[in-house]
Amino acid sequence: MAFPTAVNDQVTDAITQSNVKVIGESPAMALGNLYQAMAHSTGILFENAVSAQQQQNTLALAAANMGVMQIYSLDTATGAGAAEKGGQVGVADTLISFLSVLNSLQPVGA
């Protein structure tokens, strides 16, 4: 002890040693708490990632379902007629133009 006191030296030594023990363990306890907090945060991060993936899968299934419902809701005859008309747009005009070009290439006396 640095100076004499009215307290027993064994008591002061015990308190001093326990204080030194607490101070010596505090960096390890702080790192342990830090690692535990990081592990907990990482776990929450992965939980959120899994939740977001599940929501994206649900949205993808809903979008695919809506597409299939729209395809099945079309009348087949109407769809076939529309497809046929869509494929022949401008065919008559093209044939007439081609025929006029061929007529212009024929000799006049033929």
Image (cartoon, helix red, strand yellow):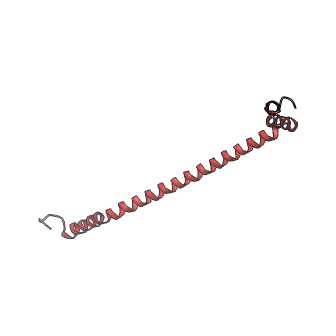
Please tell me which residue lies in front, 47 or 72: 72
Please tell me which residue lies in front, 57 or 109: 109
Q: Is residue 72 above or below residue 19?
A: above
The residue lying furthest to the bottom in this view is: 10
Question: How many numbered marks are there?
Answer: 0
Res. 68 image quadrant: top right
The residue lying furthest to the front in this view is: 109
Q: Residue at x 85, y 38 (%)?
A: 80
Res. 3 image quadrant: bottom left
Q: Where does the image place residue 66, in percent across and percent down from the top left?
A: 74, 41
Q: Is residue 86 above or below residue 51?
A: above
Left or right: residue 44 compared with residue 100: left
Res. 65 image quadrant: top right
In what quadrant of the picture does the C terminus appear?
top right
Q: Residue at x 77, y 39 (%)?
A: 70
Q: Is residue 60 above or below residue 82?
A: below
Left or right: residue 48 compared with residue 24: right
Q: Where does the image place residue 96, in percent across and percent down from the top left?
A: 82, 30
Please tell me which residue lies in front, 70 or 105: 105
Q: Where does the image place residue 79, in percent across and percent down from the top left?
A: 83, 37
Please tell me which residue lies in front, 20 or 10: 20
Q: Where does the image place residue 6, in percent across and percent down from the top left?
A: 15, 64
Q: Residue at x 21, y 70 (%)?
A: 10
Q: Residue at x 83, y 32 (%)?
A: 107
Left or right: residue 50 compared with residue 95: left
In what quadrant of the picture does the N terminus appear?
bottom left
